[in-house]
């Protein structure tokens, strides 16, 4: 079975909405691990819209499983990654205006730059994964960079409106997973996965790790609502 990396960026998004200290993503990470998460994923964006440098440093100390840092190919963030030393770095593209990571990295377009960053991360003992759309050329280019793994972008599959329209994207993911494995790469997957569409991705060959954020944090808000309201009412009654 694939392992689950829980992406806790949205916990920080809620905190940043008020600029205070709650909810704390570090507390969320600890609870996610207690519930069985195999890893914790965060994206330290250049604009620091959710996860902050402090979060990453505290998570490095608190996370008992595996810390996976998503980051753009930026010198500033690379310096932080080399210092904090997460178990894994996933290189992603980043655009200021986007709501979330929209597409995969265009590795053939910036192969030399990606290769250099992969080498620097790996020489400091950090496992590297490249977030890419499935496609033979893309995956072959990833293999040439010396990366340990790729993370297949499941967004196209996840956005399919019906099971049938999800077939072709799912087949592309399967082909990508097989090719990556043949080339000696580890295979991760993620983006847009939820409680309804995750199982076919779990059944893909060679997939070792899924990274899931939005749907888990969304569900946590809802399944936690009843208790949160009950606790507030109890305090009011007691007063
Ligand atoms: N994998 C990568 C590389 C991502 O950038 C993201 C979003 O931050 C995810 C997985 C998780 O996507 P979602 O929040 O849609 O589950």
Image (tube, rainbow, N blue to C red):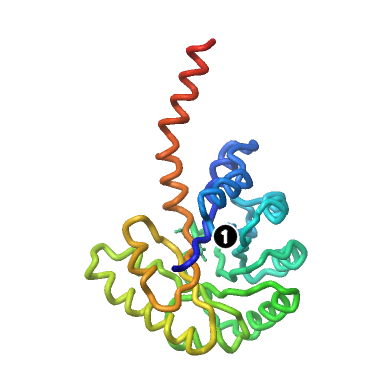
Q: Quadrant of the C terminus?
A: top right
Image quarter for residue 84? bottom right
Does residue 235 appear left or right of residue 45 in this picture? Answer: left
Given residues 28 and 43, the one toward you in this image is 28
Spot occupied by residue 8 in the image (x, y as percentages of width and height): 55, 52
Q: Nearer the viewer, residue 177 or 38?
A: 38
Residue 4: give x, y in percent of width and height. Answer: 49, 61
Image quarter (top left, top right, bottom left or bottom right) of the N terminus: bottom left
Residue visible at 54% across and 50% down in the picture = 32
Question: Could you say whether the residue bearing mark 1 is in a helix, strand or loop?
Answer: strand
Percent coordinates x, y for residue 157 in the rendering: 34, 69
In depth, the one of 204 and 165 nearer the eye is 204
Left or right: residue 174 versus residue 24 is: left
Residue sitting at 58 percent across and 74 percent down?
A: 129
Residue 24 appears left or right of 10:
right
Count of number-bearing discs: 1
Image position of 39 with respect to 28: above or below: below
95 or 169, which is in the foreground?
169
Q: Which residue is mark 1?
A: 39
Image quadrant where residue 204 sits: bottom left
Question: From the viewer's perspective, is residue 110 above or below residue 52?
Answer: below
Left/right of residue 165 with respect to residue 200 in the rendered view = left
Relative to 124, does residue 9 appear above or below in the rendering?
Answer: above
């Amino acid at each position: 079975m694939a392992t689950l990396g829980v992406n806790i960026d949205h916990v920080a998004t809620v905190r940043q909405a008020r600029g205070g200290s709650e909810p704390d993503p570090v507390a969320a990470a600890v609870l996610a691990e207690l519930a069985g998460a195999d890893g914790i994923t965060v994206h330290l964006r250049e604009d620091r819209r959710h996860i902050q440098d402090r979060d990453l440093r505290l998570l490095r100390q608190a996370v008992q499983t595996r810390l996976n840092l998503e980051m753009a190919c930026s010198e500033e963030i690379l310096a932080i990654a080399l210092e904090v030393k997460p178990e894994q770095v996933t290189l992603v593209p980043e655009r200021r205006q986007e709501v979330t990571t929209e597409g995969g990295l265009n590795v053939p377009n910036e192969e030399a730059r990606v290769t250099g960053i992969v080498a620097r991360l790996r020489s400091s003992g950090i496992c590297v994964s490249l977030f890419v759309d499935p496609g033979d050329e893309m995956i072959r280019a990833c293999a040439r960079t010396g990366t340990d793994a790729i993370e297949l972008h499941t967004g196209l599959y996840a956005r399919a409106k019906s099971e049938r329209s999800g077939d072709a994207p799912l087949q592309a993911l399967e082909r990508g997973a097989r090719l990556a494995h043949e080339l000696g790469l580890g295979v991760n997957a993620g983006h847009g996965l939820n409680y309804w569409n995750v199982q076919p991705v779990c059944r893909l060959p060679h997939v070792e790790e899924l990274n899931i954020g939005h749907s888990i944090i969304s569900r946590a808000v809802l399944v936690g609502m009843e208790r949160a309201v009950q606790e507030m009412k109890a305090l009011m009654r007691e007063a």
